[in-house]
Image (spheres, grey):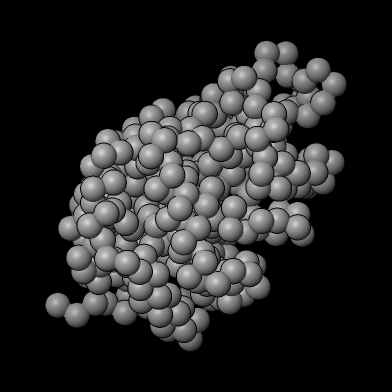
Amino acid sequence: MPLPDVLAATRSYEEWAAACTPITAAGRADRHRLMAKDPFAFLRGSYYRWAQRWAREAGPLADAVPVLAVGDAHIENFGTWRDAEGRLAWGVNDLDEADTLPWPGDLVRLLASAMLAARTSRLGIAPATAAAAILKGYTGALDAGGDPVLLDGGCDDLHLGRGPAGGARFWRRIARLHAAGDVPAGVGGALRAALPDGTRGVRILSRTAGMGSRDHLRFVAVGTWSGGPVAREVKALSPPATRWLRGDPPAADAAGAGGKELAGRIRHSPDPSLRIAHGWVLRRLAPDCRRVELSDLPAVRKEKRLLRAMGREIANVHLASVDAAVLQADLAARPDGWLLEAARGAVHEVRADFAAFAAGKLR
């Protein structure tokens, strides 16, 4: 059976996802508009299409060891948070598409995203150099049995410590959000309960963010505690797009299941504010607890180190479900250049799908 065109695939997936998850029409239209801007934005917004193509075109990589994988791995799916010791940690930001998948997929998608970002001036690094950096980080973390990334206490060799938007600018953005209208039952209470005891002047606001989940309901509770602002965010989740691809019926109770299973087992220092339950993800929102976009990073950054750290973190994720020795053996059996070759093929397909999407009339 031939692969459906990208517009048909998008319609099919979006109908399925809307049957699982509260969706906003304005957010969906905005996601379509952004996806039509450039191939990197398209990649971020169309994981369903990536999963569809990967199932057809992964070749020998499809037979690799299965792991609980990120799925939607890309260079802007990393962020910062404060761990239980108050240290600034860095790693994978969302696990919305987490599922059991062959381990190479996360690395191929990560490298493809770096190659596409380089073409839009977001990242300036040669593909072969990026591939080598990602693999070095991945193999190093496997050798170590996990290698968490911490950004303070003398640990920040990535020049990321001041990457996220400064406090005043961040809170101004939050202050500009509009009051939420209809908040689903239980969501407002969960947000308020997650704030520190004694938080005053709590308001529930609507927020639009991200790309793949830009059309999902998202609410922020913001108030004042101990002389300053505090916030918690909750976002509706869809089941991973791989369930749509397998032909599973829409099931709201499947949303977030893979992410919840992974969250407490990744070999990094976890975010103590993170909660995934009943199709929603709740977490602390602050200048130092958020997804980090490349535009947030300082002008002087070490891109090889950054990609090496991303490879480390992907290994931290995979080690949550499979022993390092199993992954090391599978990796050693791969031919030289496998990652770069696979990513180049993927980039070609993403660019073709982007051109068809941008020329279509879906948005």
- In what quadrant of the picture does the N terminus appear? bottom left
From the viewer's side, name the closer residue of 214 and 157. 157
The answer to which image quadrant residue 258 occupies is: top left
The x, y position of residue 271, in whole percent, is 54, 29
From the viewer's side, name the closer residue of 233 and 183. 233
The x, y position of residue 145, in whole percent, is 38, 34
The single residue placed furthest to the bottom in the displayed view is 359
The single residue placed furthest to the top in the displayed view is 197
In the displayed structure, 299 sits above or below 144; it is below
The single residue placed furthest to the left in the displayed view is 1
Give the residue at x 18% y 58%: 63
In this rendering, position of residue 157 left or right of residue 73: right
In this rendering, position of residue 59 left or right of residue 43: left
Q: Is residue 255 visible?
A: no
The x, y position of residue 269, in whole percent, is 52, 29
Q: How many marks?
A: 0
Give the residue at x 46% y 64%: 131
From the viewer's side, name the closer residue of 68 and 244. 68
The answer to which image quadrant residue 245 occupies is: bottom left
The x, y position of residue 195, in whole percent, is 64, 22
Give the residue at x 65% y 47%: 158
In the displayed structure, 246 sits above or below 188; it is below
